[in-house]
Image (tube, rainbow, N blue to C red):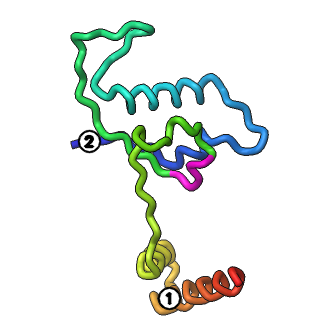
Amino acid sequence: MSCLMINDIDAGLGRFGNTQMTVNNQIVVGTLMNLSDNPTRVSIGQDWRESDITNRVPIIVTGNDFSTIYAPLIRDGRMEKFYWQPTKEDIVNIVHKMYEKDGISKDEVVSIVDMDILISLVQAG
């Protein structure tokens, strides 16, 4: 089994402020839309070859803000979206793994994460 993994797609294809949409961005978006809409068909320029049925692999993309990506690409039906909301335990494990070699204990990470959660709650009002 295999897949195509594109990390932080919004960093490359997203539109922020006054950024330009380049030809390369348009080609990538168009290709991804084509693969989403016709996953088993092969196009040669403008022509579709009926005899070429291709098995495709899943394309998994990650990103922080999909609202910056061309809207038709991420519409329902073209892309299945899964949103990850990490639990406190997930966050503690991730942060602990990041700083494990620096000698930071898991208890210290828990107190830092608890402090961050508390600050977020206070700021939220």
- The residue to which callout 1 is attached is 110
Please report contact status of discs 2 and 1: CB closer than 8 Å, yes or no.
Answer: no
Q: Is residue 56 left or right of residue 115?
A: left
Q: In percent of the image, x 46 and y 69: which residue is there?
A: 85
Q: Secondary structure at mark 2?
A: loop
Query: Residue 108, image x and y in percent?
Result: 52, 90
Q: Amino acid at mark 2?
A: Ser
Which quadrant: the C terminus? bottom right
Picture coordinates of residue 67 (x, y %)?
Answer: 60, 48
Residue 36 visible at all: yes
- At a point 50% along the width and 42% down the height, the residue shown is 74
Q: Is residue 98 magenta?
A: no
Q: Which residues are magenta?
A: 63-67
Along the line of sight, the residue nearer the viewer: 104 or 12 = 12
SS label for mark 1:
helix
Q: Nearer the viewer, residue 66 or 91?
A: 66
Q: Which residue is mark 2?
A: 2
How many residues crowd around disc 1 within 10 Å: few (fewer than 14), some, or many (20 or more)?
Answer: some
Residue displayed at 42% across by 26% down: 34
Reply above or below: 21 against 80. above
Near mark 2 (Cα within 10 A), the count class, few <14, some 14-19 or many ≥20, is few
Work out which quarter of the rendered image holds the N terminus and state it: top left
> Splitting the image into 4 quarters, where does residue 23 fall?
top right
Task: Specify the farthest residue to the right.
Answer: 18
